[in-house]
Image (spheres, rainbow, N blue to C red):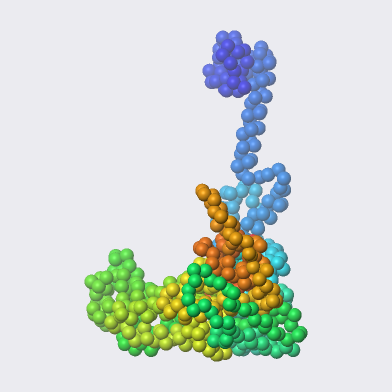
Amino acid sequence: MASEKGSHFFNFSSLDKNRSNGYCKLCHKNYKDRNGGYSNFIKHLKRIHPLEYERTSSSDSACLSEETNVVTDDRGTTDTTTNKSRQNEFALSITKNFIIKCGLPLNIVEHAGFRDFLKDCHLKYEPVSSKKLKNAVIPSLKSNVLKKIHETINNTYDLTLTIDVWSDRRCRSYLGITYHVIDEKMVPQAYLIDFTRFKSPHTGENILHLTEDVLNRFNIKEKVFKIITDNSSSMVKAYKFGLFADEEHGVLEYQTDPTSSTNSPSDNYDDDIQLDNFEVIDVKYPNNVEDYQGLPTYRLSCFLHSLQLCVRDGIQNATQISKVLNKCRMLSKVSHKSNKMADLLDQLNKSISKTNVTRWNSEYMLIKSILSIGENDLDSIVTLMENPFKFSNNDIMTLQEILDILESFFDISIKCQSGKLVTASLVVPAVVHLMVHLRDIKEQIVFSNKLVQQLELSIEKRFAGIINRINQVKIEDNDQFNDPVYFIAAGLDPSFKFLWLRDLKLTANTENRLKHDVIQLILDEINKNFKVSPTKVFDEGTFPTSKPKKKKIFVYDDSYNDNANDSIIMNPVAELEAYLNDPIKANFSEYWCRSQMKQLKKLTVRVASVQASSAPIERVFSCAGLIMSSRCTGLSEQLFKDLVFLKANQALL
């Protein structure tokens, strides 16, 4: 559109320029009117130069049209969406992002400031009422999320539940149930399937009946593998006999005794583990049970709750450290009430943590915050108390020892409550690490030996099933954590396998026997679940007999394509042998996602769904507490349940 030099045609920019001085370049004359305007110039152009006037006018219209389109695009309107659908999109986005994800109250949509903000974002925004969000948008979102959950459940064969009871600010009780699966990418997934009102007394029988009602509604009763709860008596009674206690075949207990006679293991180490000496036991079940999904499921204790009880036992029974801990608690209590102490802490850029009787790690954080202040500043803070006391050098050394002792407990607590990792495989290595940690730290302790002794005794008591299996002694039915799933999960996690045995510093024969027991547990579980014929397992023709390919010079194959994940391996013994001898160290999801060991992978999907703790359902309760804040106690029961459900499953929105 730009005019060339010497052209007799105008463009829009040249017209504006000529208007600025009323001078016509074609006639070389000035056509400014008497009042200083440029109407004479326009008349002259229209009368004497019609072609140029026409071209300039069309260019003017095109440019104005283009500018209008740009403004319209910036405001985000589209030709394909109507104004009504656009308003619905706004209402949906407000509900998803502001109400559910940010946790804002519903009546925020009726505040003048919020409406002004949205009008600034979109001029044609029509205000939406909280009633519409409550009666239309939120139920619609819940229906969509439920549909996605049903689709996920239909594609799942094994899942694990975490269950607990919670009460809100109005003392209304709710039963929360989350389910956990391993998806096709071998990544852990967790969803809240129900957050239902619990009006009955909190007895084991009522908890079980309400749980069965929820599971029947989702049709997943026979898909449940394990149930994780805390150690409260009602929870223990509710799931003591699984979900099938009332059926004809009664209660079945499957327990593998590590001291039972099996073929003799190798007395010496080999570079590779050979499974020729291991057998697959053909477990007998009642005739009316067709497969493993018909067997009763068993409750597992929350690992973190048991760990918390261990620390509580140690602190309560170690009376010599109670005096210094009471000083810490008193300082914490006063520091959150004294203005002078708060000002001094602000000057030092320090803070003293609060204690919480329901969380053992609050005392750990309290000790850590006090030790971070420094002795001189700590003395200055203590002198501001009405009844001041002094932390002696022995007190400081005792606190430092307590911190060193409990540090591993704290780190394990954080690690085992992760929602993004497989946690069942962490239990056995964690217990071993704590045993070794307490054993090794004894030489460095001066004032807190009693605490170490009490912690060791509590671990032996509360994790008796794991300790006895490691020590290869008889496991009793009432031993806590006696389920073999923890050892199976650790063995099937490529990050661990048998690496955790190194810290125990066992003799070669003892370590070999322990490996033998764990391997036999895995083979028993495969046989129990997938009905592998023992005769086929030990058929020599089923083992790969071809020699390994000779490695070519400067040819680097993908390590995941070697024998460890060879698709021709079809029997569980050969798959397990290849897996254990695989030198590849990778994280859980990466390794098993690319694995071709079908039977072992199927067992891994099942076992890895087990949660080490009930932390997932506790996170749901934390969300519920934020939703039912002190300013939102008027929420109706149904709306509250819907908001908690959507908040916990916001990844599906």
Q: Position of residue 403 (x, y in %)?
A: 35, 76
Say left or right for 622 vs 409: right
Q: Is residue 356 visible?
A: no
Q: Position of residue 354 (x, y in %)?
A: 39, 75
* Number of marks in picture: 0
Q: Residue at x 41, y 84 (%)?
A: 456
Q: Residue at x 31, y 73 (%)?
A: 371
Work out which quarter of the rendered image holds the C terminus and state it: bottom right
| Residue 167, picture quadrant | bottom right
Q: Position of residue 95 (x, y in %)?
A: 62, 61
| Residue 256, picture quadrant | bottom right
Work out which quarter of the rendered image holds the N terminus and state it: top right
**Front-lying residue, 426 or 362:** 426
On screen, residue 607 above or below 74 = below
Q: Position of residue 359 (x, y in %)?
A: 45, 79
**Front-lying residue, 303 or 621:** 303
Q: Residue at x 47, y 81 (%)?
A: 510
Q: Residue at x 36, y 84 (%)?
A: 451
Q: Is residue 117 visible?
A: yes
Query: Which residue is most to the right?
Result: 288
**Front-lying residue, 312 or 572:** 572
On screen, residue 189 above or below 531 = above
Say left or right for 168 vs 364: right
